[in-house]
């Protein structure tokens, strides 16, 4: 009987965990809701937040400030106006991710924001496969990279809420 009750409660408990989002200010102009309390780190001078949702999925958010690399928003805009920008970015992504195959890709321009979206299947050297949902938003002189990793190829509700919660103040 206890097992039967637990089976009915599990979906409700998992929903409660998902609803307990942690809003993180990535910087002065962008916020995102993590489904779990993320840990903060810096990688190559970039701010990174990582959240392990369960044993099969995790999410990350990273801010790259091009100004700190010597580029301003005018230079970034000129680079993004290059008709080959998306392909160059995509190839750079693949070059950095051994065992990755792009399944879906999309370039979207919404006002002053451009984003490159990818779904990748990644096979590690040991044969472990997972999927990466990757979204890269170019806003002014910054790039916000949002990732959701999971064992199965499906953009579930948690991933959907994670990506939809990303908000940028008007420029």
Image (cartoon, helix red, strand yellow):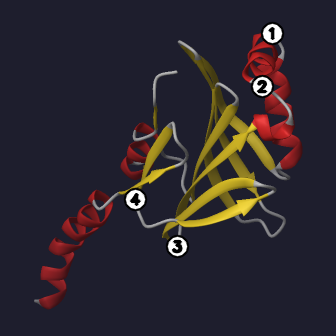
Residue displayed at 85% across by 25% down: 88
| Viewer-closest of 162 and 101 | 162
- Mark 4–mark 2 Cα distance, whole angstroms, equals 33 Å
In the displayed structure, 45 sits above or below 30; it is below
- Mark 3–mark 1 Cα distance, whole angstroms, equals 40 Å
- Numbered tag placed on residue 55 in the rendering: 3
117 left or right, relative to 86: left
Mark 2 or mark 3, earlier in chain = 3
Total number of numbered discs in the rendering: 4
- Mark 1–mark 4 Cα distance, whole angstroms, equals 36 Å
Residue 83, x across and y down, in percent: 80, 9
Q: Circle 4 is placed at which residue position?
A: 35
6 left or right, relative to 87: left
- Mark 1–mark 2 Cα distance, whole angstroms, equals 20 Å
Of the two numbered discs 3 and 1 in the rendering, the one whose residue sits closer to the viewer: 1
Q: Determine whether the residue tagged by mark 2 lies in a helix, strand or loop.
A: loop
Mark 3 or mark 1, earlier in chain = 3
Residue 90, x across and y down, in percent: 79, 31
133 left or right, relative to 125: left
Q: Circle 1 is placed at which residue position?
A: 83
């Amino acid at each position: 009987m206890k097992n039967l009750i637990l089976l009915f409660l599990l979906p409700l408990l998992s929903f409660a965990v998902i609803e307990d989002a942690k809003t993180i200010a990535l910087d002065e102009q962008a916020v995102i809701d993590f489904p779990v309390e993320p840990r903060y780190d810096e990688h190559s001078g970039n701010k990174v937040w990582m959240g392990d949702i369960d044993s099969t999925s995790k999410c990350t958010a990273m801010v790259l400030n091009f100004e700190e690399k010597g580029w301003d928003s005018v230079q970034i805009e000129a680079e993004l106006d290059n008709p080959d920008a998306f392909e160059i970015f995509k190839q750079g992504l693949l070059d950095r991710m051994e065992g990755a195959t792009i399944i879906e890709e999309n370039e979207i321009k919404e006002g002053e924001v451009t984003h490159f979206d990818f779904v990748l299947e990644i096979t590690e050297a040991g044969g472990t496969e997972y999927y990466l949902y990757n979204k890269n938003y170019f806003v002014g002189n910054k790039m916000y990279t949002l990732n959701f990793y999971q064992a199965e190829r499906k953009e579930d509700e948690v991933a959907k809420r994670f990506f939809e919660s990303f908000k940028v103040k008007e420029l």
